Amino acid sequence: MRSASAYAPGRVELLGNHTDYNRGVVLAAAIDRGITARGSSRKDELITLASDLAPGRVEVPLADVRPQPTERWANYPLGVVQQLQRLGYHIGGFEARISGDVPAGAGLSSSAALEVATAGLLMKLHGLQIAPLEVAKLCQRAENEFVGVRSGLLDQATSVFGRADHVVYLDCNSEDVRTIPFPRGFALVIVESGVKHSLLQSQYNARREECAAAARALGVAALRGVTPEALERARESLDPLLYRRAAHIVGENERVWRAVDAMQSGDAQAIGALMYASHESSRVNFENSAPELDQLVLIAQSIAGVLGSRLTGGGFGGGTVTLVEAQRAAEVLEQIWNQYALRSGETPAGFVCRIADGAAVSWSG
Ligand code: GLA
């Protein structure tokens, strides 16, 4: 009987909101919070799953892997099993236990971390060699096809390819992944609004539909193919809602490219300005913010040592990411807490994040 464990981090999206499924570009980083899957192989043909993070124990025959209506957390690992089976890998019976510290519903991709950790565990238990990009993609398919969220590649790719003190640049058209040093002397503060949107899945999928409709109206295969100039030329003939959705995606791609230049020249001020602009575009164009997130960004903006702030991840709730001067990070977090509590009566959770290595670092080590 073999035993193994695998860890995968959550991620924070810095810029490039909802661009991934539009074949656009994204900047994100792996964080120092993650999910561990520990397990061992079994002699029979069963999968048993348990989690320290959610109640319930799941037992599923290998030959009949199907979505669980009650223990929904188990659908992420089970979706990964199904994808590996579809790719023709022989997966034997196994038991696994999940643990971790990525807050769920905070926009930090606990789900991708769970998928990637499961893939890592199964690769170790079965001696499978799968290229890191393929791992990210099969985990994405697990989420799309088994869980039913039509998300892009951002979360899984960042969890796989993250690198300490670097941001991950992902081009979802060419599938090119690069890491770029994060500017020295700056840090990221993450604040969870505590708003968990029950309609997240349907609203996320609805935005995806709207982006596809905008692309069709503009005569391109995906919004990646639209320049800011072409969008402005088409404005009059485009449905105003589709125009706003497209403006967000086109603008986000531009902001990612500008931020890459700013990262390379160490211009944190410019990156911060792009983050504010991104949030404003989420609020107005993509309408995936929430009053609590707007409030958190406004509060951050009023605090000394803050360079930029925006919602992170899918939106409609979740959390914000704030770029700060490193030596003021703890103080900024406390001030955001205090001011938010004063205005809303709620105490948000949050932490100063360390940019960490992704899962592939441990696979290759
Ligand atoms: C969620 C999805 C990602 C991405 C972001 C928004 O995190 O899982 O694929 O679309 O939202 O950028």
Image (spheres, helix red, strand yellow):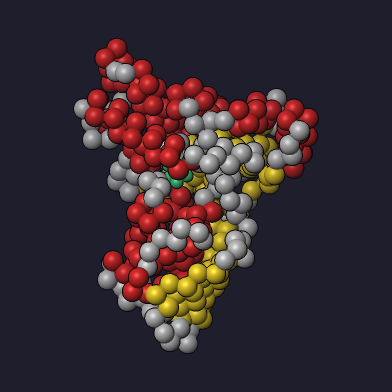
Report if residue 124 is visible in the image. Answer: no
Q: Quadrant of residue 143?
A: bottom left
- Residue under the point 50% across and 69% down: 58
User: Residue 116 at what x, y percent from top left?
Assistant: 46, 61
- Residue 230 position within the rendered picture, expressed as x and y whole percent measured from the top left: 28, 20
Q: Is residue 137 above or below residue 189?
A: below
User: Extreme top residue here?
Assistant: 236
Judge from the rendering whether residue 73 lies leftward or rightward of residue 174; answer left or right.
right
**In the image, 227: left or right of 148?**
left
- Residue placed at 53% from the left, 30% from the top? 289
Point out the quarter of the image occupied by ligand 1.
top left
Q: Is residue 340 left or right of residue 314?
A: right
Residue 228 spot, x, y in % from top left: 34, 22
271 or 316: nearer the viewer: 316
* Between 128 and 163, the one nearer to me in the picture: 128
| Drawn side of residue 182 relative to residue 256, left or right | right
230 relative to 11, above or below? above
Considering every residue shown, the one lying at the far left of the view is 219
Q: Nearer the viewer, residue 154 or 216?
A: 216
Residue 197 shows in this picture: yes
Residue at point 50% right, 59% down?
A: 70
Q: Residue at x 45, y 61 (%)?
A: 68
Query: Is residue 225 depicted above or below 83 in this figure?
Result: above
Q: How many marks?
A: 0
Residue 243 at x, y = what percent?
A: 35, 21
